[in-house]
Image (tube, grey):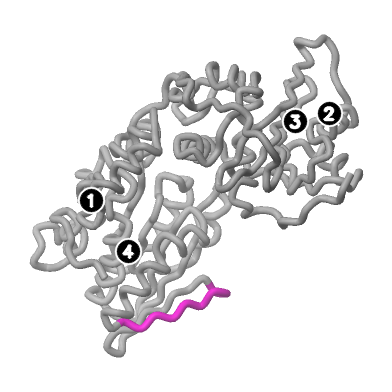
């Protein structure tokens, strides 16, 4: 149970009350750093407000995906609501949360706003209010469609997010235009969360660097610039290959014919994955291209007689994935390919020591020194150069490191 709230959190919890100075606002916007307490307070406040607003109403809670919404908001909030005397019933097949208090029930429909097609999911509804968690990760069409559904008198909008690029549409229209939108804007930092210890704050600060540090720790809407992994210039992030065998092995592949192909061989020791070896072939440098079968032969040579848990491959490399499947030696999975989120996860994994790059991986080390953000664009994107080992490392972290997207079956002996 939360025992204390900061002044800013209390404002989130009460802005809609008739005795609040913010009562006449139509919306609330909370942005800022991770672990600042804004998400929890906003979800709690939203549900309590819905009963202050009335009963037997329809509301929407929107996240990037239904899965992330349940993890970030629904599961934490239902436990607290039940302790406060609310009754909560989640109907998973309908993506619906029913909350009852003193004989009145409100319906909270859950939506994932992951792409432009998501706008169709919410069409035709009539809502009394909508809450957006991670609104900066949602397409504008989805957000605007959800807002248009709030046609009940007195309905209000709730927005929560971590910062992105300063040219992001939500930053330009809602945060910079908060007064014109009649929205209460509150900026959060970790210091606004009284339940966070100084030790935990320091740990989060150590996990980020560069633009991710500015956004997720400082809570700033800043543009990307410079090296994607600036800390990798430090020698301490490169290791010798540990002696002996590893408990598990895996391979990540960024496939290319005209562009370079980069395969990374990973071994797990304890809780740490080491990139112990690599295959890197640049057809432009070598003066000839290799076929899928030749790249597959190189994969087999890289693996040797090791038993591989799985091979993650660039999801666009359909022909190479099929070659691996046809041979039947390795379990192959298409890699997850959200670039910016993947870069953030790789950065955290490197800084926390969950993955380590061995000094045998010369191509990866060279690319770490060259991999840059594209500063000419008004979106977050790296320059599409010197990114092949960077991509295969990203595929490993997002797809194989935590074992979440494949069946953990050991490959047949070769």
- Taking 186 as reference, is 227 left or right? right
Q: CA distance from mark 2 to mark 3?
A: 12 Å
- Taking 353 as reference, is 266 left or right? right
Q: Is residue 372 above or below residue 351?
A: above
Q: Quadrant of the N terminus?
A: bottom left
Q: Is residue 22 above or below residue 107?
A: above
Residue mark closest to the camera, 4 vs 1: 4
Q: How many marks?
A: 4
Pointer 4 with pointer 1, Cβ within 8 A: no
Q: Residue placed at 75% from the left, 17% from the top? A: 282
SS category of the residue bearing label 2? helix
Q: Is residue 100 above or below residue 146?
A: below
Residue mark closest to the camera, 4 vs 3: 3
In the rendered image, residue 294 lying in the magenta stretch gets the answer no
Of marks 4 and 2, which one's residue comes earlier in the chain? 4
Q: Residues within 10 Å of mark 1 (few under 14, many from 20)?
A: many
Magenta-tinted stretch: 86-94
* Percent of width and height locating residue 73: 39, 63
Label 2 sits on residue: 298
Q: Residue placed at 17% from the left, 63% from the top? A: 4
Residue mark closest to the camera, 1 vs 2: 2
Residue 340 appears in the picture as rendered = no
Of marks 4 and 1, which one's residue comes earlier in the chain? 4
Q: CA distance from mark 4 to mark 1?
A: 17 Å
Q: Which quadrant would residue 209 be assigned to in this image?
A: top left
Q: CA distance from mark 1 to mark 2?
A: 58 Å
* Percent of width and height locating residue 56: 35, 81
Of marks 4 and 3, which one's residue comes earlier in the chain? 4
Label 3 sits on residue: 255
Pointer 4 with pointer 2, Cβ within 8 A: no
In the rendered image, residue 93 lying in the magenta stretch gets the answer yes
Residue 43, numbered label: 4
């Amino acid at each position: 149970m939360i025992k204390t709230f900061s002044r800013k959190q209390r404002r989130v919890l009460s802005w809609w009350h008739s005795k609040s100075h913010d009562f006449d606002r139509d919306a609330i916007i909370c942005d800022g750093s991770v672990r600042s307490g804004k998400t929890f307070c906003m979800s709690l406040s939203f549900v309590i407000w819905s009963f202050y607003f009335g009963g037997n109403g329809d509301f929407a809670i929107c996240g990037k995906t239904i899965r992330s919404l349940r993890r970030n908001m629904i599961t934490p909030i239902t436990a607290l609501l039940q302790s406060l005397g609310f009754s909560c019933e989640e109907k998973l097949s309908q993506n619906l949360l029913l909350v009852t208090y003193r004989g009145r029930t409100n319906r909270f429909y859950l939506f994932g706003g992951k792409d432009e097609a998501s706008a169709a999911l919410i069409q035709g509804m009539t809502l009394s209010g909508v809450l957006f968690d991670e609104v900066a990760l949602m397409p504008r069409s989805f957000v605007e469609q959800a807002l248009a559904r709030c046609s009940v008198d007195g309905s209000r909008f709730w927005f929560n997010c971590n910062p992105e690029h300063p040219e992001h549409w939500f930053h330009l229209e809602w945060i910079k235009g908060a007064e014109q939108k009649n929205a209460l804007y509150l900026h959060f930092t970790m210091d606004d969360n009284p339940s966070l210890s100084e030790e935990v704050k320091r740990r989060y600060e150590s996990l980020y660097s560069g633009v991710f540090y500015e956004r997720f720790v400082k809570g700033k809407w800043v543009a990307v610039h410079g090296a994607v992994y600036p800390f990798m210039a430090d020698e301490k992030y490169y290791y010798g290959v540990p002696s002996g065998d590893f408990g598990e092995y895996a391979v990540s592949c960024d496939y290319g014919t005209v562009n370079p192909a980069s395969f990374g061989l990973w071994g797990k020791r304890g809780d740490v994955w080491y990139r112990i070896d690599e295959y890197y072939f640049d057809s432009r440098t070598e003066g000839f291209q290799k076929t899928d079968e030749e790249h597959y032969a190189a994969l087999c040579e890289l693996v040797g007689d090791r038993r591989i848990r799985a091979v993650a491959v660039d999801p666009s490399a359909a022909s190479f994935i099929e070659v691996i499947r046809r041979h039947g030696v390795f379990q192959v999975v298409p890699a997850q390919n959200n670039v910016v989120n993947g870069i953030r996860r790789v950065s955290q994994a490197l800084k926390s020591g969950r993955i380590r790059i061995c000094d045998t991986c010369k191509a990866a080390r060279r690319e770490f020194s060259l991999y840059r953000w594209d500063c000419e664009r008004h979106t977050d994107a790296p320059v599409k150069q010197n990114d092949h080992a960077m991509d295969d490392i990203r595929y490993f972290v997002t797809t194989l490191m935590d074992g979440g997207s494949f069946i953990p079956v050991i490959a047949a002996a070769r």
